[in-house]
Amino acid sequence: MPTRQDTLAAARESWNAGDLDGYLRLYDDRIRLHGYSPEPMDKQEVREFYAMVFRAFERPQLAFHEVLWDGDACAIRFTMSGRHVGEFMGVPGTGTEIALDGITILRFDGDRVVERFSQADMLGLLVQIGAVPAPA
């Protein structure tokens, strides 16, 4: 049986290879993802959200800067990078290279994630793609 660390590493490798189905194996069918919508997302909503990300950003890449484990949970400081090529939050593709920083906490049951809490610098991303002006 794979360890939690193995499952997380395989998910990041799948994401970076453009394999959304492989990435989604990280999540249990009971997943509740908090932070990217007003209400927690279930697995189908998570799939739709990340499919939109894959359409909006060419070969999005995940870099993990720190991964801290505590029992059945881990916290990750990450950066997603890519080139904005498709519509994202109403903004058509700009060709801009982006870097989206964030922090996420994953709670595992066995080797699958059942709950995730995420915060990402969405305002910074919107500034990068020209949706909102940079602060003065």
Image (cartoon, helix red, strand yellow):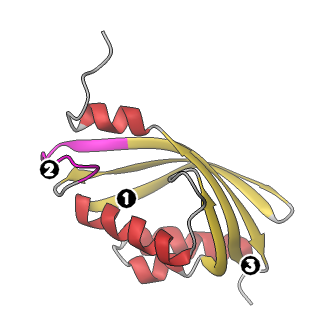
Question: Is 89 a magenta residue?
Answer: yes
Q: Closer to the camera, 22 or 127? A: 127
State the residue at coordinates (68%, 72%): 113
Hey, which residue is sitting farthest bottom in the picture?
A: 1
Check the picture and name the quadrant holding the N terminus.
Answer: bottom right
- The residue type indicated by label 1 comes to Gln
Q: Is residue 1 above or below residue 53?
A: below
Mark linked to residue 92: 2
Can you tell which quarter of the image residue 29 is in?
A: bottom right
Give the mark nearer the N terminus: 2 vs 3. Answer: 3
Mark linked to residue 61: 1
Measure the alpha-carbon separation of dots 2 and 3.
Answer: 40 Å
- The residue type indicated by label 3 comes to Thr
Measure the alpha-carbon separation of dots 3 and 1.
Answer: 23 Å
In percent of width and height, residue 97 lies at 22, 44
Give the mark nearer the N terminus: 3 vs 1. Answer: 3
Hey, which residue is sitting farthest top in the picture?
A: 136
Q: Is residue 19 above or below residue 73?
A: below
